[in-house]
Each structure stands twice: as C-alpha cells, then as structure tokens.
Image: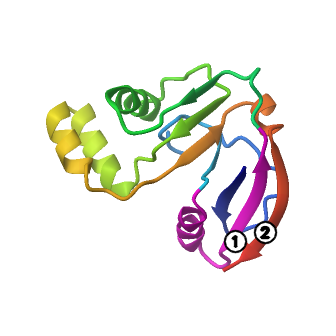
Amino acid sequence: MQIYYGSNVIVNQPKIITDGFYKDFGYGFYCTNFEKQAKRWALTKKNKHVVNVYSYTENKNLNCLIFKEMSDEWLDFVVSSRQGIRHEYDIVEGPMADDTIWNYVDDFARGLISRTAFWELVKFKYPTHQIVFCTEAALKCLEYDRSYQL
C-alpha cells in the first residue's frame, strides 16, 4: 500500500516526532493513504510544499489499533491521546480529527457538549485518514519511494 506524508522537506528516513502538542493518536510519524490529504498538509507549510511517498508493508507481529470509522471508542482514544495519556500500540490508524472536528472533540472533552451533540456535528464532514507509526519497529514497515514538490 502507498501512503503519503505532507511536509516542506524530503523525508527519506522517517522519525518518530515526540515534541510539540499532543495529537489524535499520540506521538509518532503521521501519514495518510489519501494523497489529496497529504497535499493539504504540505500546503500548510511555509516555503516548499513536498509530498513524500512510502510503501507500507503490514507486519502482523506489531500491536496495531485500527479505527475503521469515527466511533465512541475512537472519540475516547483521541481525547485521551490529546490529554497526553500514552498507549502501547506500535501503529494506530483511523479517521483524523481535523481542525473543525478537533474543536468539537475539545468541547466534548471539556463537557461543553454531549456525546450525542458531537456525533450530530461531525456527521457531514469529509472522510479523512491517518496512520501513525509510534515505535521504531513500526517505522521498519515503511520504505521511502519518492517525493514531489507542489
């Protein structure tokens, strides 16, 4: 399977990012299987806009968590990850809480909206995808193919 990473540089040796603010699935190297989404990520960067392309080979021996769609379990996992609670997965995959959805996640986490209200607000959002490689073993599933500039 091909996956993509939007950046402002060529990343031929991915690394786990462990600084900055907490993300949907915790710290790691975030990619997507939607090329269009990687292009959007790249266009948010200053100067250059680069899409990196990798081959991803699944390793059944790794501890993986896959959310096929947004669900209560996904929402709870995103909230805990965004609060800095660590998990033990090598790879986590599923929908992304983009900027709009993140506002709803934050409102839910702070008790400002109910779980039911959250689902009503997000049901019309376009599909997103992210896969985060959280360990060095997980990164070995990636092989750099190429990069291109937008």
User: Could you say which is closer to the camera, residue 38 or residue 58?
Assistant: 58
Disc 2: which residue: 147
Q: Is residue 121 left or right of residue 135?
A: left
State whether residue 31 is above or below residue 119: below
Whether residue 112 can be seen here: no
Identify which residue is drawn at 54% across, 23% down: 86
Magenta stretch bounds = 34-57
x%, y% of residue 51?
69, 67
State whether residue 8 is above or below residue 15: below
Image quadrant of residue 58?
top right
- Secondary structure of the residue carrying tag 2 is strand
Does the CB distance between marks 2 and 1 fall below 8 Å? yes
Is residue 98 inside the magenta stretch?
A: no
- Secondary structure of the residue carrying tag 1 is strand
Q: CA distance from mark 2 to mark 1?
A: 7 Å
Is residue 48 inside the magenta stretch?
A: yes
